[in-house]
Structures are given as structure tokens and as C-alpha cells.
Image (cartoon, rainbow, N blue to C red):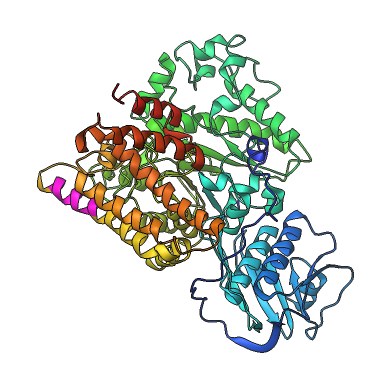
Amino acid sequence: MKKFLCVLLGMACLLSCVLSACAKQEQKPDTTQPQTQPAGIADTDIVLAENGSTAYKIVIPENADECEEYASEELELLFEEATGADIAVVRDTGMTFNEKEKVISLGETSIKQGSGLDVAAAGLNADGYRIKRYGNTLVVAGVNVQGTLYGVYEFLKHEFGFETYMPDEVYLEQKEKVYLKDFDYSDDPDFLGRNYDGLVMDSSQFAGRMRSTNTLTTDERFGDAASTVRAFGGLVCDNAINSVLPKDEYKEAHPGWYDYTANQICLSYEDRMGIELGSVEETSDDSVVKNYVEGIIELIEADTRGAYIIGIGENDNRGYCNCTNCQALLKEAGNKQSALWIRFANRVIAMLEEWKERQPEYKDREFEYIVLAYGASQYAPVVDDGNGGWKLAADWAKPDPRIMIEFIPQGACFYHSLFDGDCSTNASYALEWEKWHSDALWDDDDPHFMIYDYVTCYRNFLPFFDNFNVRQETYQVYYESGVTSVMATSTTHQKFSSMSDLRNYLEMKLQWNVYEDVPKLIENFMTNVYKQAAPYMSEYFNRLRTNMAVKEQEFIANGQPFHLDMYEATPYQYSTTVYSKAFVEELSGLLDQAYAAYDGIKDPVEREKMQLRITKESFCLRYIILLNYGEYYDITAPEYEEMVLQWEKDSSMLGATWSKEGVGIADTIASFKSDIAG
């Protein structure tokens, strides 16, 4: 059963400066490349537009919110681009439903109400939508306002083949005459929370068109996030406990919280100090739980959007408390750190819920709570029951049913499926996934899981990260396991890496529909993004992948494991073991051919745009060459200096910022320059 979740917006200002670009500033859609339109919806004999004119108009609610207005703007903009027709947008000021009228109704209009279209009856989740034709009238309506926006994009896809590949690459077929299709269509996403960082953080329009919920925390054009699911970074309080109780602010008044830990707060402080937990008003001011609850209450009262997702999780890489009480509890729970966090979360929930019941304005609000399964706490608080199943590691380790577990496979191998029992690294994650789903933990059938996943190498952002063969399978397991929200962490600080534009596209497509035809998506991406250079870039991508597959078999034949993780095993990504001199020269040759394929483009702006896409990929490959230059060539030769200086110039042109976690491009350039002879 899918359960409707809501987002908290308390920290939206963190990213608002990044996503403030006007949606109207759009790259003109490309109409030159072949694009297969979705099959299955037949044309009617009703003319939608002809010879640059249309009898249709767009109707939005009289009091349309920003998302509904934006949906109409997108439809108006793209409709005109496809047909040449200027379609009017009008507000519903007492209109009545008449199927003879040529209107496209968006959202909760009186036309939609008069049509009898019941979106809820379709059983769609929060971001779902319906598109239905009634005579000449077309009704597009979502379960929420962003569902209506997504319905607009679906309409455009079926009528004009609309597809967004990159912020500056949009396909839209131009038609002199187009007929209204016989719509009776509905759709909803496989995950309510669809979150992806990297490039989408820079383009709210791109993220919105890809139906990513990233933008919901920062841009009201994409919907009232209080009516949809969690978007990462949009919580009333961040998952880390330090966001509510920052050590720098609380240590002086409460030194005992940190007596036995450098940074992580004591989770059993009340037991150690004999503090009795009651209501938030009655409990000692020295209580960790009380202070945490008071911090949450302050944020809830400051919120104006009805938000109610609350994070209760450990600080990143901060260790754990070593006090006698915490260690005794840990021993009692079979050394399962997650048990202590669930115990703490249960205490927070009990106190906050008791307070909520006494507050008329919040009494009916159903809070949801996120607890991280991360680092040492990734291990589920269950033990073998001796009968082939699992039992609670301790009676007090059973999660409150309102808890959502955010599973974070930080140390996984990303070359193999997360649930591949034959992968020596991932076998433990597959087992923990099974344990977390144990009936010993949950008494209901509601979903209790979110995912924070990784699709990059933090040791080196730029090289090719080959997880393309397992992403669909991984997403499918997430979906089939009832996961409600996914977050894929890409090159967070560095806005691109090898083939990252393709990765961005595929990740966001799979977050909406885990059963997409991935090979077809890749084919369409190559055709529409690289155009004249598509054959060379397709071969380049395939050679990267087949080379990795060959190397895996070589490792196996030599009795060595072959893994691809965020940190330790990633020398495979950029060493001469994988990237031989002959191979990098082959790849360089393909990129040279791809670059030259655009020489015939007469428009200098278009030519430069296309060549820049190849330069970006070349930049990533040249990083590997520069890292290994002394093994490939004579590092004292002038060609090395020329390559370093060109790489420096390209880094500025491309906006490259980081080569690895904590190491900026400028530092990398300085390192390369230090090897220049003389």
C-alpha cells in the first residue's frame, strides 16, 4: 500500500538563490531530430491547431496558485513553439462545462467539476494526474497541483513528442496541423519523493520538466510542497540531530551530553542522570529529549505550510557515545547501534505527540518521523530467532509505527546490484534490507522506507562511474519493496562528470517509472543530444562500459574482487589497470571524431554549443590522462604542459569546481603544474 507523505519546507532558503532563474528563459526546443511519439492514443478529427492559429484556449482556476499558473505558462509557451499558434490563457470566472467548447482545462476549474472527472477515483498517488477528453474539451487535473503540471507535460509528449534531455536540449515536434488525441489517460510516479542532486540543483525548470521533487522545497511554481512528499533538504529539521541541537550552542549549558563522545550526543542521558520523562513542560530542562522536542516545536510553530516530516538521525561521521549506559544498552541489543537511535526516536515521538494532542491547531496533523540507517546504525535491530527468522534485539528496539527508515548504503559496491548476494560487498546490504523488513519490527503493511543512494565516486568525481547496468534493477527492488522516496546523490559539488548528462536523464526517468525501456532511452538521448556526433558518442559510451566488463572478468580470473564504491575501491576508475594507453587513445580518437562532426553547422552559436558537450566529456577523459601521464608518455615533454594549460582553460569555461570531495579544481591544476619540467 502506498502511503501519502508530506514535505516540510522550513529550510528552503538554503537553495533558493540557486534556483531562482526564470522559467521563461528557456532554450528553444529542437525540432530537427527524429523522435518516436508514444503510441496508443489515437487522433480524433478535432483540429487542435492549424496554420499557426487555434480556436482553443487554456483555462485555469480563478484563484490559481503559482504552480497552476506555471503549468499554463509552460503549455502556452510550448504549444506556440510547436504550432505557431498563440493560445490564450483565461481564468475560470464562473465558466460552465460544455463539451462543445474548445478549451484545455487545467486543475480544479468549474469545467473539471462539471465534467465529473474524479481524479481520486483513479487510485493515483500524490503526484498523479488524469487527462480526459469530453468532446472538444480536454481536462487535465492532478491529485495535487504539481500533478496538473506533470499532466501538461504528458499532453505535450503525446501531441508533440515533447521530451527534455538537458536544460538546453528539449525536443518538440513542429506541426502545421495537429489533431486532438482521444485522451483518457492517467499516470502517477513509482516514488513520491524523487530527488537527485547535481545539475538539477542549478535548473529548477529542468528538474520540474523531469518531474523531480527537488524543486519543491525552493520554488513555489512547482507546487505547494506541503501537499506532496519529502524532498531532500526540505525538512522542518534536518535528519542530523545537530541541526536541532547544534553542539556549539548547547555544550556550554549541557556539558554532560558530550562527556563520553567527541561530537555525537548521548542517547541515554536521561537514564544516566535519573531524569524522568513526562510532558515537555514537566521534564527537566537538562533532558536531551526535551530540548530536541522543544527545538522541533519551535520549527513547527514557525512553519506556515502544514509541514510534518521530522528527521531524527545521527550526525554525519561523528562517532557514538561511550558512556556506561549507552554501552550497556548497546550490549543488550546485540551491538545494534540502530536500536539506540530507535529508542531515542520513540522517546522524542512520545513527548512530541503528547504535546500535539493538547494543541488544537496541530492535533489533527499526522507527523512522520525519519530515522537514518547509516554507518553503524544501518544494521537492523533484530537478531536470529533460531527458527530461520528474526526477532527484536531488545524489547525497547521496536520502532514507533510512524517512523520511516532512511536506508543509506554508503559502503556498497555500485558496479553490482545492491541486492546481489553474490557480490561480496553487497551481500551484507541485501541481508540488512531483509532484516529491516522483518515482521518483528512492523505490525502494519504501511511503507516504512526511504532511500538515500549514491551514483558517484567521492574519491574522484570526474571519471566514468559505471553503475548503468544495475540502476534499473536497484530502483525496481526499491519500488517493489514499498520504498516511498528516493534520493540519488551525484557529484554534489561538481556539476558534471563523465557521461553525467545521460546519467541525470536516466536517473530521473527511472525515479518516475522503474520499468522504463532503458536501452531505448539511451538511444533517444544519444540521437537528440549529440545529433551528428551520436554514432561516435554511442560508441564511446559502449566502449567505456565494455572495457569495464572485460576488466571485471580479468580480475575474477586472477582471483581478485572487482567492486566500485564511493571511496576505497575506486582506483579501478582511473588507473592504468583499467585505462591503458591504447584505450585512452582510442577514446580520445572517438571524441575527436565527435567534435569534428559539428564542423558543418553554419550557426556559430549552435556549433559552439554542440562542441562544448564534447569538450565537457573530453575534460573528464583528459583528467585520467593527466593523472597517469607519466605512465603513458614523457611527462617532461612540452605536450604535458600544453595539456595542463588547456585543461585549466577548459575548467574555467565549463565551470568545473571540484575534482574530488574536499579537493577543488584549482588544487588539482596546481598539482598537475607542479609536475611541469623546469
Instruction: Name the residue at 41% across, 55% down.
Output: 475
Question: Is 527 situated above or below 414?
Answer: below
The residue nearer to you, when weighing 458 against 633, is: 633
Q: List x then y, in percent, for residue 434.
A: 35, 48
Q: Is residue 123 magenta?
A: no
Residue nearest the observer in this picture, 613 or 646: 646
Residue at the bottom extreme, as displayed? 45
**Quadrant of residue 395 within the rendered picture:** top left
What main secondary structure does the magenta stretch of the protein show? helix
Residue 425 located left or right of residue 510: left
What residue is drawn where x is 22% and y is 43%? 424
Which residue appears farthest toward the left when viewing the image?
A: 558
Q: Position of residue 165 (x, y in %)?
A: 51, 60
Residue 235, percent across and down?
61, 39
Is residue 472 at all visible to an observer of this figure?
Answer: no
Q: Which residue occupies the foreground of this view, 564 or 658?
A: 658
Left or right? Give the position of 523 relative to 20: left
- Total numbered circles: 0
Residue 22 sits above or below residue 652 on the image: below
Q: Quadrant of the C terminus?
A: top left
**Residue at x 78%, y 81% (from the top left corner):** 55
- 548 drawn magenta: yes
| Residue 542 x %, y % | 30, 59
Report the span colored magenta: 547-556
Position of 362 relative to 290 (above/below): below
